[in-house]
Amino acid sequence: MPVLNTYIKKFCISNNKRIIDILSIFEKNRTNLAVIIDKNKKFQGIITISDIRKAILNGYRNNSPIKDIINKNPIYLKDKVDENQISNIVSSERFNHIRPPLIPILSKNLIPYKIINKNNIQLTSLRTRKLKFKPRILLIGGAGYIGSILAKKLIKIGYDVTIFDKFIYMSKQKIKKFIKSKNLDLISGDSRNISQIFSAVKSNDIVVHLAELVGDPLCEKQPSKTYEINFLASMAISNICKNLSVSKLIYISSCSVYGANKNNEILTENSKILPLSVYAKLKALIEKTIIRNMDEYCRPCILRLGTVFGSSLRPRYDLVINLFSGLVANKKQITIHGGNQWRPFIHVDDVAESIVKIIKIDKEKTNGQIFNLASFNCKISDIGKAIKKNYPKANIKYNKIVKDKRNYKVSSSKAQKMIKFSPRFSLEMGIKELVNFTKKNKIKNLNLRKFQNILNSDRF
Ligand SMILES: NC(=O)c1ccc[n+]([C@@H]2O[C@H](COP(=O)([O-])OP(=O)(O)OC[C@H]3O[C@@H](n4cnc5c(N)ncnc54)[C@H](O)[C@@H]3O)[C@@H](O)[C@H]2O)c1
């Protein structure tokens, strides 16, 4: 009986197994391709994530046997790999469409012994053992404040990224100008349109969902659209990801779900939530729905972000640190309402960096988990103090009327432990960055439509 070498063994699976067993091979190797063998270890074909997606759409389930869905005629190379064989394959029409870009190599008696990446297909590289496969990433709402920074980061480290967005705040042209890369794909669409979402998810491996009406004032103004987009469309996205066996779904929630915490204790992911606004109530509801909707393979990771600050390709001046810094840059008066409310904060670059970590990390650490993500907790009045310290001429007025009742402090120690969350930006660094950004880009009017979500309520 032939013996499989230890390298190929982890990609191989017997033809009498179930679909769920293949999914765990994908997960272990992070490749989306499994090599199917018979009981004599002979090559029978391959199964990729697209074969599984097609099967599921045709009524197969995760516990169905794999024997009917094997691709028995894939591209492969056979011993001895020579230049003729390679050039025949490379010049074939099918070669351009292989996805994932992986090709099995078999011995002359059809025993698999290696897998190579088609993009490194040279005789010399057949000897290298390292397989490079990067999942394709879909950012729904990727043209927004957080998504655009995340897209830029992912492209920089070599991922293929698709942004699916309604492009409400930033045009396609603008994002193309900021991120020039052939690895970035832009799709105009609406998350409420199931067929558009379905076809976008189908060609990707990991989904980050950021497309919503964001912020209390905007959601209060458009409650039914908020319900459609933030809840119903998010629910559809989670179902589609489950049905298409997407390996990771990352959903961006908010620490607003904690609401008003009178005891001022530090809240963890297990603390009671008390959402106050429409925005926060729907965040709490969709978190619960997405978590309940998980199955053996597609299990979401939910991030409860503190209020974000920092500059972005799509700047926002409707977030408290950004607004105060923008006013300082323009020598305008800052008014602090109340000021004693505690809130968690995180820089936009630290959010993007944490999402990249979750994309890279072993799924078992993030599967079905909720993480608080905040770099620090401070009172709103502390932001005023930090501004005064660095810009003594800043004009700050205090007003006793509390407009925003949210008051909570959160702990991010679970994220520190499990995903090595290690934010770089402090409050003072963020303020200085924002003041300089506002001055450098000569942003004089912070109330332009593109900077303020609330002014776009008619565009959803
Ligand atoms: N910025 C924060 O302080 C903060 C804090 C906590 C959580 N979050 C969450 O992070 C996510 C992203 O927030 P952001 O600050 O980048 O917001 P944003 O408003 O800048 O971005 C949202 C993006 O979604 C797109 N979009 C909205 N509705 C859509 C639809 N129906 N179909 C397709 N695209 C649509 C918009 O065009 C925009 O590009 C949101 O879920 C938000 O609730 C943000």
Image (tube, rainbow, N blue to C red):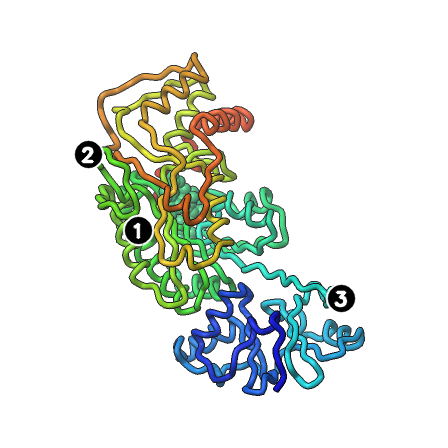
Q: State the residue at coordinates (34%, 64%).
A: 294
Q: Are the residues flagged by discs 3 and 2 in contact, CB closer than 8 Å?
A: no
Is 125 situated left or right of 140 in this image? right
* Front of the two marks 2 and 1: 2
Q: Residue at the right extreme?
A: 83
**Secondary element type, mark 2:** loop
Q: Mark 2: give few (<14), some (14-19) or many (20+) Cα within 10 Å.
A: few
Cα distance between the residues tagged 3 and 2 = 65 Å
Please name the amino acid that badge 1 sits on.
Lys
**Secondary element type, mark 3:** loop
Please name the amino acid that badge 2 sits on.
Lys
Q: Residue 181 placed where, x, y %? A: 63, 50
Q: Residue 255 placed where, x, y %? A: 32, 42
Name the image quarter holding residue 416. Answer: top left
Q: Which residue is mark 2?
A: 262
Q: Are the residues flagged by discs 3 and 1 in contact, CB closer than 8 Å?
A: no
Q: Which residue is mark 3?
A: 122
**Secondary element type, mark 1:** helix
Cα distance between the residues tagged 3 and 1 = 53 Å
Cα distance between the residues tagged 2 and 1 = 31 Å
Residue 398, numbered label? none
